[in-house]
């Protein structure tokens, strides 16, 4: 039984592929919120970031357009403060040794997935997609269909994303 989460799904896929190629039985290959490997490459990442920035701008403009000036200014101040707090948290995390080690592992994993050249897997993939909205965000999960003999998709409820899909209440739903 082999499982991978997010970018680790590509690693799990390759482990299952190699074991299968060597004649080993893989009882389950489960990918949880695993974008297709090409979505980690620079062109796809640039397109995703541009789309996300445009969506944020649309959301903020909608909020501002529907608000009186005073409420709009308060909205902008709150968003600026949220960004400052998030940035301060990231700076603190840069100096945490445990998080630094984790970041190095994550960076190495992403670098490996970016270079990965997928070969076909002669088995079944169980792909756990957090929600319908996640399917459309740019991770190209539909492309896993071309990578294996069988793809069985399991979709979580609205509001679920990769950050919470393995936590309650979503874990029970996906299980």
Image (cartoon, rainbow, N blue to C red):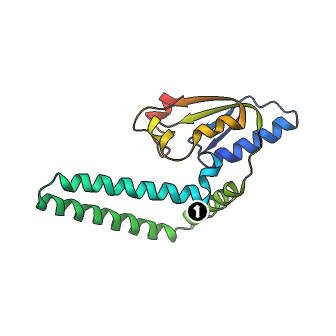
- Quarter where residue 82 is shown: bottom left
Q: Residue at x 23, y 53 (%)?
A: 63
Q: Tell me residue 115's x, y (percent).
A: 71, 57
Query: Residue 108: percent from the left, percent from the top?
Result: 67, 61
From the viewer's side, name the closer residue of 175 and 13.
13
**Looking at the picture, how far across and down is residue 52, in whole percent?**
43, 54
Rendered position, 31 above or below 52: above
**Front residue of 50 and 158:** 50
Quarter of the image that includes the C terminus? top right
Query: Residue drawn at (62%, 49%), measured in percent from left and top?
Result: 7
Say above or below: 24 vs 81. Answer: above
State which quadrant residue 26 falls in: top right
The quadrant in which the N terminus is found is: top right
The answer to whether 1 appears left or right of 22 in the picture is left
Residue 29 location in percent, x, y?
Answer: 69, 34
In-front residue for pair 7/164: 7
- The answer to whether residue 10 is left or right of residue 142 is right
Mark 1 sits on what residue? 103
User: Which residue: 14% across, 58% down?
Assistant: 71
Residue 4 placement: quadrant: top right
């Amino acid at each position: 039984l082999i499982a991978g989460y997010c970018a680790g799904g590509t690693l799990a896929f390759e482990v299952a592929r190699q074991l299968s190629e060597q004649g080993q039985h893989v009882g389950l290959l489960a990918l949880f919120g695993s974008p297709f490997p090409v979505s980690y490459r620079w062109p796809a990442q640039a397109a995703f970031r541009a789309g996300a920035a445009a969506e944020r701008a649309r959301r903020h403009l909608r909020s501002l357009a529907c608000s009186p000036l005073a409420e709009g200014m308060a909205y902008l101040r709150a968003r600026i403060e949220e960004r400052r707090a998030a940035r301060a948290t990231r700076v603190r995390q840069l100096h945490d040794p445990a998080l630094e080690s984790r970041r190095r592992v994550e960076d190495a994993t992403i670098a490996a997935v970016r270079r990965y050249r997928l070969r076909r897997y002669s088995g079944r993939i169980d792909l756990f997609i957090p929600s319908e909205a996640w399917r459309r965000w740019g991770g190209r999960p539909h492309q896993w269909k071309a990578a294996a003999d069988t793809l069985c998709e399991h979709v979580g409820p609205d509001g679920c994303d990769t950050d919470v899909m393995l936590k309650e209440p979503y874990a029970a739903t996906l299980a």
